Image (cartoon, helix red, strand yellow):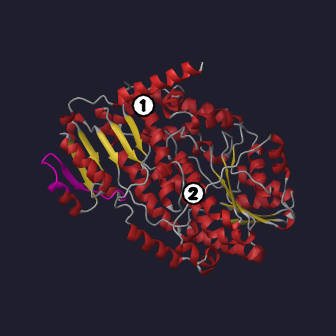
Amino acid sequence: MWLSLVVLVGLYYLLRWYRERQVVSHLQDKYVFITGCDTGFGNLLARQLDMKGMRVLAACLTEEGAKQLRVRTSERLETVTLDVTNTESIAAATQWVKEHVGERGLWGLVNNAGIIIPTAANEWLTKQDFVRVLEVNLLGVIEVTLSLLPLVRKARGRVVNVASILGRLSLCGGGYCISKYGVEAFSDSLRRDLFYFGVKVAIIEPGFFRTNILPLERFSQTLKNQWNQASSEVKETYGEKFLASPPHCSMAALTDLSFMYRWFKNCNLVRNLSEKYVFITGCDSGFGNQLARQLVDRGMRVLAACLTEEGAQKLQQDTSYQLQTILLDVTKTESIKAAAQWVRDQVGEQGLWALVNNAGVGLPSGPNEWLTKEDFVKVINVNLVGLIDVTLHMLPMVKKARGRVVNMSSSGGRVAVIGGGYCVSKFGVEAFSDSIRRELHYFGVKVSIIEPGNYRTSILGKEGLETRMQKLWERLPPETRDSYGEEYFRIYTNKLKNMMQLAEPRIKDVTNSMEHAIVSRSPRVRYNPGLDAKLLYLPLAKFPTPVTDFILSRYFPRPADSV
């Protein structure tokens, strides 16, 4: 048996080795568009492909970088200036590429442009520091891809997205790891969307290489600048020695020795719960609303944040005096600052025992090509950037109580099952939670991630799913609609409706997990409520990527223009 298994594995890698060495014919006729070609990976790749005779369209951020690249290459290579954070610049570059490639289309799109700074301990940073990196590394990749995708589909080419090994393991604070987790999610969902069109999507996950993305002297200076901007309270808790010591990462692996040991840990509850404060976002309905009620029943002091006055009033009427409400829009920093001050006034010197980041939206979602950058931004601003902003404002109070942070992610944060900003944002939540958990370990603060399966809540809004999908479909250009076909739209919409109808209505499994993360002395790092999470999504996340792609591709329909 073991010999047979070894032979099968050997044959698999032999076949893989053989296939990866098969080269596409007529390379000299194919166009490749590469972003971030001023220096580093993009610059070297552009020169390599030019030497192979390919037609390289190199996008540089600066005119100086473009000139230097042209000097070192042949006349075949052409350059254009591109700022991936600027929609007008992307539109102009797309038109320029369209004029060059004509009817043959674009064979390769390489999304390489990226930045890493500012990077530091999460608590030293601001929302703007995270957004700056996300706009280049994630939203820039998404917008460039959506703009050039019709040209890539015309050539039945490929998309190559540069992620990082830190897109799999979040080892540092700031927006870099979060953005690379998001690139992984976007690439996975895009690959499954484009499979039937004959378009291949590859992800590059390099380790640590020395490029201009992270000059050592600039990194040290940036770290000092972030330290100088941190509040005096933060500086005192970390201490000067923390800044002086070299960056390091520590990881601990916990293995349950037996079911009884885990049962004992789960039953080991925190004392004096009636004196502890919990702040929960997104309490108008769903998980947040139910959790607030459960914690009040436990006698805890609940500070519930709702988006609407109506939601706040209803929750207040249905609970006791131990619950207080406040209006909060997690996409607005002013609203978050006001809520943080209100919480500070409530908790006083004892601090905040638990912060539960539950607020979230699920739409717009659908095939990536049907969406716009704004559709992605709308979801990411709530689910990811809002969560980061709330956490950074509340963290000093949580540290004071040596409490915990509970972040609502999803099974979609482990495997990207649908296009749009939802899975991208939840992959980002996983990255942020992992990095902040490692940073706060020494302060006695615990961080838990909730990864529920498919549950029926109001996250999809009040408007019908069919109506929303119809609006997405109708705004598509005729060329895109023709390539997918009416039959694809009908079946895809019906599949989504079936998924929603099969969603588990009993949400208490999820809120019980959230409650355990708050009241247990030994909360788990990850909770996976729901049989579908345990038996479907987690295995899919662990399978080799081609296996996961094959399984998921069986569920959704073939487009009209499939190969």
Eye-nearest disc, 1 or 2: 2
Whether residue 535 appears in magenta in the rendering, the answer is no
Task: Describe residue 245's horizontal placement relative to residue 159 as left or right.
Answer: right
Specify the quadrant that holds the N terminus: top right
Disc 1 target residue: 195
Residue at 54% from the left image edge and 57% from the top image edge:
171
For the residue pair 162 and 139, the one nearer the viewer reads as 162
Q: Position of residue 338 (x, y in %)?
A: 64, 73
Q: Is residue 34 above or below residue 328?
A: above
Specify the quadrant that holds the C terminus: top left
Q: Position of residue 513 (x, y in %)?
A: 75, 48
Task: Tell me the amino acid under the disc marked 1.
Answer: Phe
Task: Tell me the amino acid under the disc marked 2.
Answer: Phe
Whether residue 271 is visible, yes or no, is yes
Task: Describe residue 119's horizontal placement relative to residue 439 as left or right.
Answer: left
Q: Tell me the magenta residue range.
A: 69-85
Label ID, residue 432:
2
Secondary structure beneath disc 2? helix
